[in-house]
Amino acid sequence: MPKSKRSKLVSLTKVAKKTKEQKGAMIKDLQENADKWKYCWLFQVGAMRNTHLKTVRKLWKDTARIFFGRSAVMAKALGTTPEEEHRLGLNKLAKQIQGQVGVLFTDSEPDEVLEWFADFKQPDFARAGNIASRTVILPAGPVMRIHSDPPEPFPHNEEPQLRKLGLSTSMNKGVPTLHSPHKLCEKGKVLTGEQAQLLKLIGEKMVVFRVALLARWCAETGEVVQIEGQQLPEEETAGDAAEELDDGMEE
């Protein structure tokens, strides 16, 4: 009997890496945009979700260009020293490109950009490794899906999964039921995979995707302005990885 292809293991060493040509193309693209736009913003993302970041890109598609890729490549493109900087003053911004950050080029005035990103927040489900933002206790009685309107109990066929994820449930008139309150998670503590899955099943959104603007470069003056009070707490930026994203991606 032939081996199933579905069970075939693929070594991580065989995963395709960015080629020298692709990196060169990204550097060229970044530099061309640095020549085109009035401002370049450095931003950081909390509760990273590629879907939400792509939404930001689409909403700014006609008035900005967003890059969220390898920090070393982006920093090299802009130049981290006065001798290497692509335009006057860009080295001050490039030196800050570390970790999961991105850059946004736009002609929109600073007040408009700051106001828009301050308002853009998207609640989402936490993942394993995120920090619980609040304590969640499931009361005794039927285990409810709070995202339903009105809330409804879980169906009988999902009771085995609830037990597998750590709930001491039993069937009561065909409904998965808790006989005593269950602390699902505690504020400030790291979520396990089981806790994150339970929070998603009941519909409890624990994190908020948001974009923090860290600094702004102005093409006219070459000055870099730091945006005070925007640095995100470490717990908001840890644990979630993002794919490389720029406005030139295919849909």
Image (spheres, rainbow, N blue to C red):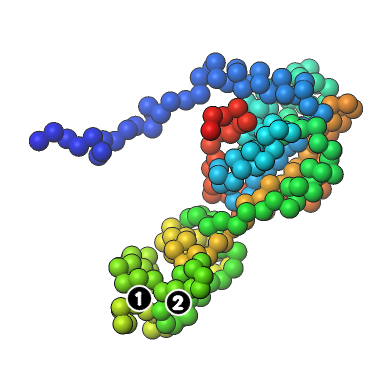
Q: CA distance from mark 1 to mark 2?
A: 13 Å
Q: Which residue is mark 2?
A: 182
Image point (42%, 82%), residue name: 141
The answer to which of 182 and 35 lies nearer the viewer is 35
Residue 130 visible in rendering? yes
Tell me the quadrant of the picture where the N terminus can be found.
Answer: top left
Q: Is residue 237 above or below residue 148?
A: above
Q: Earlier in the sequence, mark 1 or mark 2?
A: 1
Q: Quadrant of residue 218?
A: top right
The answer to which of 173 and 149 lies nearer the viewer is 149
Image point (43%, 60%), residue name: 197
The x and y percentages for residue 236 are 62, 53
State yes or no: discs 1 and 2 in contact (Cβ < 8 Å).
no
Q: Is residue 238 above or below residue 251?
A: below
Q: Quadrant of residue 227?
A: top right
Residue 105 located left or right of residue 175: right
Residue 95 visible in rendering? no
From this viewpoint, which residue is outermost toward the right? 221
The x and y percentages for residue 121 are 67, 53
Q: Which residue is mark 1?
A: 176
Q: Residue flagged by tag 2: what amino acid is it? A: His
Q: Secondary structure at mark 1?
A: strand
Residue 245 located left or right of residue 15: right
Q: Is residue 162 above or below residue 119?
A: below
Q: Secondary structure at mark 2?
A: strand
The x and y percentages for residue 87 are 80, 21
Q: Residue flagged by tag 1: what amino acid is it? A: Pro
Badge 2: few (under 14), some or many (20 or more) residues near its Cα, within 10 Å?
some
Q: Quadrant of residue 88?
A: top right
Q: Is residue 251 above or below residue 180?
A: above
Image point (84%, 40%), residue name: 110
